[in-house]
């Protein structure tokens, strides 16, 4: 009995943290989504479902689908790059040094990194000037203010969040299993797909969640390099919070993001549980 009571005692700080910084803010957002916009901003305590009518507007649906497919592309390319990178680090003799190179970008301001990419991809940026000097192009390419720029830069900013959880799983992987698969006649590709990938699935799921969820709520990258063609839900939320000051509508859109990301999280967790149950059987 004492052990159980002490266990509950140790969980109090985590429970308070989750309640104060996660549950309570989420409840406030959900509550605001059912209220009415104030005359000069803020909210009025008048219940309404009007804010959710925006989900049936073609313009909003277009932005919603654009946000989802940009997030999916970002997640796909991020994980695709993170797996071989984490594999290389886990197999290298210089693990600490390589991990340091992955972490170093966190020491630099997020906006500075975005503006560095603007100086690379801009009309008069490094990449266009280089391609023109070597004669590949005659006029600068339009590499900014489009969906492609948003995907590229978001992948760059998301890579550390995918590499680190993958590295922690791959480092524990028994690489002799791959050699055993080869001895049994499997090709390198088959050994990779049937032995390596299933054993690092938990790391892949973590990497997907750490990439997809922030990408869904991305604001700064599409704002600075996306232009009007790559507006995402994060930009719409910010606009209603700061320009139109329609907090209930911004809360309703935020609630939609919470629902979408929660569904994605539940789907991944359920698939992982099914795989674990299948392995146990």
Image: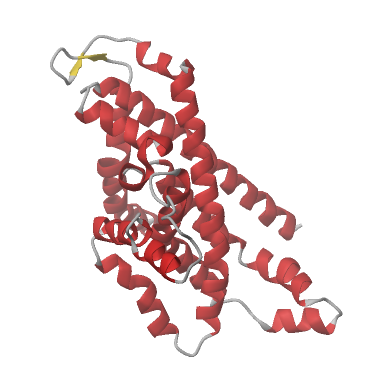
- Name the side, left or right, on which 147 lies relative to 73: left
- Name the side, left or right, on which 237 lies relative to 92: left
Q: Nearer the viewer, residue 166 or 138?
A: 138
Is the residue 45 above or below the residue 88 in the image? above
- Give percent across and percent down for residue 55: 45, 20
- Name the side, left or right, on which 267 lies relative to 164: right
- Give percent across and percent down for residue 213: 44, 46
Q: Nearer the viewer, residue 101 or 177?
A: 101
- Where is the N terminus found, in terms of image quarters? bottom left
- Give percent across and percent down for residue 47: 30, 10
Q: Quadrant of residue 145?
A: top left
Applied colour scheme? secondary structure
Residue 232 in view of the camera: no
- Where is the C terminus found, in terms of image quarters? bottom right
Kindly give the residue lying farthest to the left in the view shown: 40
Q: Quadrant of residue 158?
A: bottom left
- Name the side, left or right, on which 39 lies relative to 81: left
Kindly give the residue lying farthest to the right in the view shown: 185
Q: Quadrant of residue 237?
A: top left
Q: Residue at x 50, y 72 (%)?
A: 167
Residue 179 in view of the camera: yes
Is the residue 142 above or below the residue 232 in the image? below
Total numbered circles: 0
Q: Nearer the viewer, residue 177 or 84?
A: 84
Q: Residue at x 67, y 56 (%)?
A: 276
Q: Residue at x 45, y 84 (%)?
A: 95
- Give percent across and percent down for residue 161: 42, 61
């Amino acid at each position: 009995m004492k052990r159980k009571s002490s266990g509950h005692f140790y969980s109090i700080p985590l429970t308070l943290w989750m309640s104060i910084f996660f549950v309570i803010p989420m409840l406030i957002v959900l509550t605001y989504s059912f209220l009415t916009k104030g005359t000069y901003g803020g909210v009025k305590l008048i219940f309404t479902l009007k804010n959710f009518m925006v989900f049936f507007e073609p313009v909003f649906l277009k932005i919603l689908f654009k946000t989802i497919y940009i997030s999916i592309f970002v997640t796909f390319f991020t994980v695709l790059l993170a797996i071989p990178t984490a594999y290389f680090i886990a197999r290298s003799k210089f693990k600490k040094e390589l991990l340091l190179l992955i972490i170093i970008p966190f020491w630099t301001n997020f906006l500075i990194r975005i503006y560095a990419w603007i100086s690379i991809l801009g009309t008069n940026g490094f990449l266009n000037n280089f391609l023109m000097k070597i004669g590949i192009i005659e006029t600068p390419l339009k590499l900014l203010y489009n969906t492609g720029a948003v995907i590229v830069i978001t992948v760059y900013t998301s890579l550390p969040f995918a590499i680190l959880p993958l590295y922690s799983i791959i480092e524990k992987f028994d690489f002799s299993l791959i050699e055993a698969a080869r001895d049994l006649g499997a090709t390198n590709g088959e050994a990779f797909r049937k032995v390596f990938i299933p054993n690092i699935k938990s790391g892949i799921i973590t990497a997907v969640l750490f990439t997809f969820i922030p990408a869904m709520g991305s604001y700064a990258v599409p704002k600075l390099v996306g232009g009007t063609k790559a507006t995402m839900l994060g930009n719409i939320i910010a606009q209603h919070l700061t320009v139109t000051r329609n907090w209930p509508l911004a809360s309703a859109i935020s609630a939609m993001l919470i629902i979408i990301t929660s569904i994605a999280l539940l789907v991944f967790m359920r698939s992982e549980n099914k795989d674990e149950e299948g392995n146990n059987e």
